[in-house]
Image (cartoon, rainbow, N blue to C red):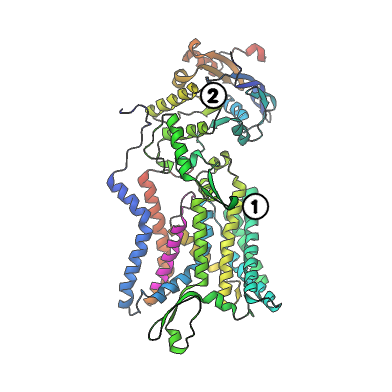
Amino acid sequence: MSEPVLSIRNLTKRFGGLTAVNTVSLDINPGEVVALLGDNGAGKSTLIKCVSGVHLPDEGEIRFEGKPVSFPKPIDARSAGIETIYQDLALANNLDVPANIFLGREVKHRYLGGLINTLNDKLMLAESEQSLATLDIQFPSLTQPIESLSGGQRQAVAIARAIYWKARLMIMDEPTNNLGVPEQQKVLELIRRLRDQGVPVILITHTMPDVFAVADRIVVMHRGRKVTEKRTGETNATELVQYMVGALDDNREAAA
Amino acid sequence: MTDSKAIPAEPRLPPDKRFILLASRLWAWVFLGLMIVFFIIAVPLAGGATFLTLRNAMNILVAITPVLLLGLGQTFVIISAGIDLSVGWVMSLASVVSAHAIRASFNAGAPLLLAATLGFLAAVGASAGVGLVNGLIIAKLKVPAFIVTLGSSFIVRGMALLFSENTTVIGLPAEIRDYGNESLFYVVNGEGGGFYAFFRPDVTGAMLRQMDRIFTWPVVITAIVVLICMFILNRTQFGRHTYAIGGNMQAALRTGIPVDRHIVKLYMLSSVTAGIAGFLSTLRFTAGSAVIGDPLLLSSIAAVIIGGVSLFGGAGSIVGTVIGALIIAVLTTGLVMMNVQAFWQFIVVGAVVIIAVLIDQSRDLILGRRGRGS
């Protein structure tokens, strides 16, 4: 097996007296979709935020592409190639698709030796079209404010942005929440396409059908600890729910 | 499903809704046009002079310059979902400070143009300083813009009154008046008249009363500031980031936009356009006034809102603000010419502001938006 893209070793994060993440270890391999399951407060969001630079872990090590890393700020994780798509997608709904894909990294024409710079909207539009095309996404118009787009289309814009900026690990927080069933299918299809292009995906979700539809591996957390890790084919929804509520725990002895 | 790969689009709006949407976008233009037509007909009926004259049009332009300048910077600030309540008194402070600078440098022997330039720099410097402090407190200390600029407007008010000599700085060189009142072009009507550019024709007496000044220097300078603001807002990264911060602050932060620094620049820009307004009023009246700006603050915010800038941030344009300022000025001028008691202006302008917001909201309802942000 090739080297893992992301390797988390004995990571712990405390908030005051609360241990939100308790000595969790986890590997993500190239071209793999890993579902991170758990009830509210299980620690999955905190774990992810340690990887994406929102929180600094108290203990443990994160290795990305073989090198130990530390991300004091989210922008540091992003420039390393870890893109996180939160539920609010971090899109500006009043701007169009290219403006969102290039938000904060706009391409500019330079005049008078960089004294006056204007936006190169033409180039950004062309690049956006191309980026969406590689993901097989089609929109009626890219130059309308994206508030006129559906939830699934906006999710697709967020994914296209991550891909355009060469994400080498994608973290998605509840990507199918608040979407209609056909749109859920499209987003899952996009996740599969990401995997096929070799981009590993960590999928945070509550939705059991999503897990079995796209995940290769499943990690369940309960009260800050990783309670199990299974290949998708080796488990079923009933068993996973038992892990999620704490009735089953593979690591109970280890933690005690 | 025809194409399995296309993500389903929302159905297109039916034609009647599309029409309402278009109308709601263009209503300010239509309203301005209708208002002008109304006054062309109504002013003579009410016993006034002809409404649509060159002189009248130029007077309206002169009248809107201060309100418009205050509104230009405010447009940026409100698009970013902020507000700047200090611009009225910043204009006053700039007027006083520039009057001092002009007087002192002229008395020290500086030529007129240099004195005026120093006055301009003093106005811009003082206002930029206020904007810098506003912006730093808003961005770094996370105090709401409404509170910060409310507080600073009192502070600046005190400073403007302290620096002025009993509200008015006088004793400026009389020639400075020409910078504030002479114009790019002149038209002398009647016999022996003509069209002149740059230099005032040598006319006196009855002929002088026949002379119209076309685009006085403050109007020209304001027009240049309008063009610069349009360029910044529409064509540059600064403008794009202003919309992004107003549309979704979290998205702006997560995508690495330097939001704090941007906010500081926005409040500096807002102050500086107010400072230019103060400088121009000093030129126009050959005096610095500590009470010139305050009455204009709410008119300028009204112009911005009538022009379609959303107080929730994320939407609006410079052209809209220009139209908004024109609507207020045309209304005021027209009503005065109809010999309507001046207080009615306020009632009508207030109604237009509320109608403008109602139209904006109905547009959101038609589109089924539930507000901005996520």
Chain name for mark 2: A
Magenta stretch contains residue A145: no
Identify the residue under disc 1.
B136
* Image coords of residue B111 (percent x, y): 65, 76
Identify the residue under disc 2.
A202
**Residue most toward the right?**
B108
Quadrant in which the C terminus of chain A appears: top right
Occupied quadrant, residue A177: top left
Chain name for mark 1: B
For label 2, the crowd category at 10 Å Cα-Cα, with few meaning under 14, some 14 to 19 and many 20 or more, is many
Left/right of residue B104 with respect to residue A132 in the rendered view: right
Name the residue at 56% across, 70% down: B280
**Which three-letter amino acid code belongs to the residue tagged 1?**
Leu
User: Which numbered circle lies on residue A55?
Assistant: none
Mark 2–mark 1 distance (CA, rounded to whole Å): 39 Å
**Residue most toward the left?**
B15
2 and 1 marks on the same chain: no
Q: Which residues are magenta?
A: B309-334
Q: Is residue A100 above or below residue A41?
A: below
Dot 1: element? helix
**Which three-letter amino acid code belongs to the residue tagged 2?**
Ile
